[in-house]
Image: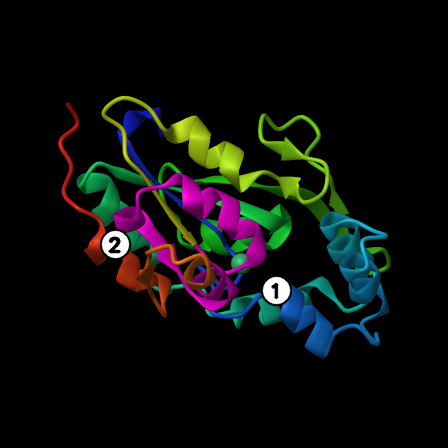
Amino acid sequence: MTSSAYPNTLVTDFDGTLTRTDFFQAVLERLVDDNLSIWNRYCQGSITHFEALAGYYRQIRIQQSKLLEMVNELGFPKNFANLVNGLRKNKWDVVIASAGCEWYIRYLVNLSDINPSPIVHANGGTYSDDAGLVMELPRHSPHFHPEIGISKASVVKAHMGLNRSVAFAGDGPTDLEPALLVDPKLRFAKGALARLLSDKEEEFIPFYDWDEIPNHLPEMDSN
Ligand SMILES: [Mg+2]
């Protein structure tokens, strides 16, 4: 199922945007013992964003059930199904685009039991108690980006077209490029993304919780 059934698309980042807390932050704070050495190598440019995240995730060594308990505490919207279904009635679909891992994103999205389930563009991954969360680059994705896995800008562009509106919501530096592609009235930002947009004197709609966003999306004609 593609989202072509809906003329308008809200492309949303996941970590820190749909959830209150980044999976990455929670892993760093609670599950891996690291002095930010991997992250510093990323900041120095010697490894990619993907390699940094994957480097931390493969160090996780707890039971899967415990890890999922932590995922349940990331602050994913409890009313996500109602929000998505309401948006779909108003001709907006929701597409998730993330530089994180599909493993925990799908877990939370599937709990919402939405039919059809929203499309997720993210890095693949599998979890086992002895190998940790092994993340894989989505080389076969039409939106493949070698450094972060998924190009969110590519996802936004794929949904643009005549009589189609695209909104974007994000919170981090990897969200800047896709955010700049959409109309400022359909651009939702918090955190580092909001600061980056302000620095560029670009307009956006600030939000704190993702569930504020649907109220800002206009009723749209499909033709
Ligand atoms: Mg984010």
Q: Is residue 223 above or below residue 79?
A: above
Mark 1 neighbour class, 10 Å CA radius: few under 14, some 14 to 19, many 20 or more: many
Which residue is painted at 51% across and 38% down in the image?
Answer: 153
Name the residue beneath numbered marker 1: 23
Q: Is residue 160 above or below residue 44?
A: above
Read off the residue under disc 2: 214
The magenta region covers 170-196
Seen at 23% across and 25% down, the residue is 163
Q: Measure how far apart labels 2 and 1 are at the Cα level.
A: 23 Å
Residue at 64% from the left image edge and 72% from the top image edge:
26
Q: Is residue 101 above or below residue 25?
A: above
Q: Is residue 185 on the magenta stretch?
A: yes
Circle nearer the N terminus (2, 1) = 1
Which quadrant of the rendered structure holds the N terminus? top left
Q: Observer-nearest residue: 20 or 31?
A: 20
Q: Which percent across, then down, holds residue 89? A: 18, 40
Q: Position of residue 27 (x, y in %)?
A: 70, 69
The foreground one among 92 and 191 is 191
